Amino acid sequence: MRLSNGEVLLHYPLDLHVLTQGWYYNNGSLHQATDWRTQNGTDYKRPVYAAEDGTVDQTQDWDGHTKTGMQSYGNMVRIKHAPYKSMTLQTRYAHLSSYCVKVGQKVKEGELIGFSGVTGNVFGAHLHFEVILNDRRTNPLTWLSDDFTLATGKEYTFQPGEHSVVVPDADKPAENTSQNKLQVITIGPVSQGDADAIYLLCKERGLTDAGLYKSAWA
């Protein structure tokens, strides 16, 4: 998602936002990516979604045994997005059990592109997620919202000066939108008993005090 200030807010690639490894692994070695929990009981296959509109520019099928080089990613998808400040922006999704897109296919933000798995060089099920800017990997957490939790509380998050994306007020959804819209509903004919029940419900929800409830019985 492109924000009004020119920044980019990426969609989380999973519906579960639990960070298991950050820019640095928990052992202190450089990771240059983030790993996200996918295990749900005995099931490790979670839907994986495109982080933003773009075009699939690379896919890879794991050969089933090699765990070095590009094959370390296992089954993998990479998406090229619109340029960011005239620089090439891409996202990579690795260790998939399967994918359902092909090179050259255009995808929308939040669209299903595959399912998480345990392919490639991996110890336990997770999604490996990268953000690549001009062929250099950057900390994915700086492209996401702060709506995530840490698996153990010890996962590395940000380098000095880094932080989650700050969304301008102009791009935030309006709060209490249901209260900002007046909806007229006509019900009838109804019995006096039903009318009384509807009136009590509206009163409980403050609609009568706000002048949003009118009854022919009143």
Image: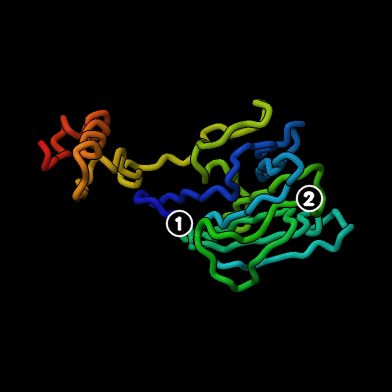
Mark sitting on residue 118: 2
Mark 2: give few (<14), some (14-19) or many (20+) Cα within 10 Å: many
Q: Position of residue 30 (x, y in %)?
A: 72, 40
Q: Position of residue 216 (x, y in %)?
A: 11, 42
Q: Position of residue 163 (x, y in %)?
A: 51, 36
The quadrant where residue 72 appears: bottom right
Query: Quadrant of the image for the C terminus?
Result: top left
- Would you place residue 10 above or below residue 208 in this image? below
Q: Nearer the viewer, residue 189 or 114?
A: 189
In the rendered image, the residue lying farthest to the top is 153
- Would you place residue 33 above or below residue 193 in this image? below
In the rendered image, the residue lying farthest to the right is 65
Q: Nearer the viewer, residue 44 or 106?
A: 44
Name the residue: 54% across, 54% down.
Answer: 51
Decide which of tag 1 and tag 2 comes sooner along the chain: 1
Q: Position of residue 34 (x, y in %)?
A: 65, 43
Determine the secondary structure under disc 2.
loop
Q: Nearer the viewer, residue 164 or 13?
A: 13
The three-letter amino acid code for the residue at tag 2 is Val
Residues at marks 1 and 2 touching, judged by CB atoms closer than 8 Å? no
- The reply, left or right, for residue 193 in relation to residue 109 is left
Name the residue: 62% across, 61% down.
Answer: 113
Give the residue pinned by disc 1: 85
